[in-house]
Amino acid sequence: GRFLLYVNYVRKNGAYGGNAVFEAESPVGPFSLVNPSMNLSNLCPRPAQSPPCGKAQGGAGDFDVFVDPADGAAYIAYSVEYYLKLERLTPDMLNSSGENATWVGGLFE
């Protein structure tokens, strides 16, 4: 099997580090780092990296990853600066595909 562990982290110097992805063949590990910094549109390390990264807007709060049972597409939902973001992940589930929406006034835009 393939098991992914997503974390958001703070660097040793106290700066926000981003979201990282670890992978293992068992749910109890051992896990290996496969992506130290996901390219989420509003969480890219400063300065912003290559697309689909946009302007960095601060560190993430809560987040969750889910897979749509209808089509198998994976998404990450996360909070940043009082907004809720939803982004479709790449097929390998290691990065953002660049498709994203922001929760505004009760709707995703």
Image (tube, grey):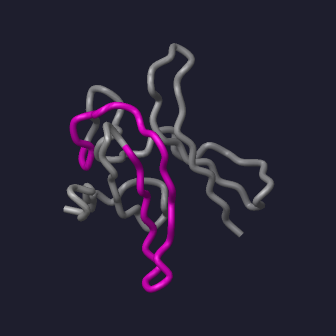
Q: 94 or 10, which is in the foreground?
A: 10
Where is residue 92 drawn, in percent x and y? 49, 64
Above or below for 85 versus 91? above
Residue 22 vs residue 70, the one in the foreground: 70
Name which residue lies at 43% across and 83% down: 71
Please give the name of the residue rendered at 45% of the width and 36% of the height, measured from the top-left corner: 18
Segment tinted magenta in the rendering:
51-79
Image quarter of residue 16: top left
Instruction: Kindly give the residue lying farthest to the top in the view shown.
Output: 13
The foreground one among 93 and 70 is 70
Q: Residue furthest bottom?
A: 70
Image x and y of residue 35, in percent = 52, 45
Pick the quarter of the image with the C terminus. bottom left
Q: Quadrant of the N terminus?
A: bottom right
Of the pair 94 and 106, the residue shown nearer to us: 106
Residue 90, compared with residue 42, is above or below; it is: below
Q: What residue lies at 37% left-to-right and 55% top-to-bottom? A: 96
Let me know if residue 57 is in the magenta part: yes
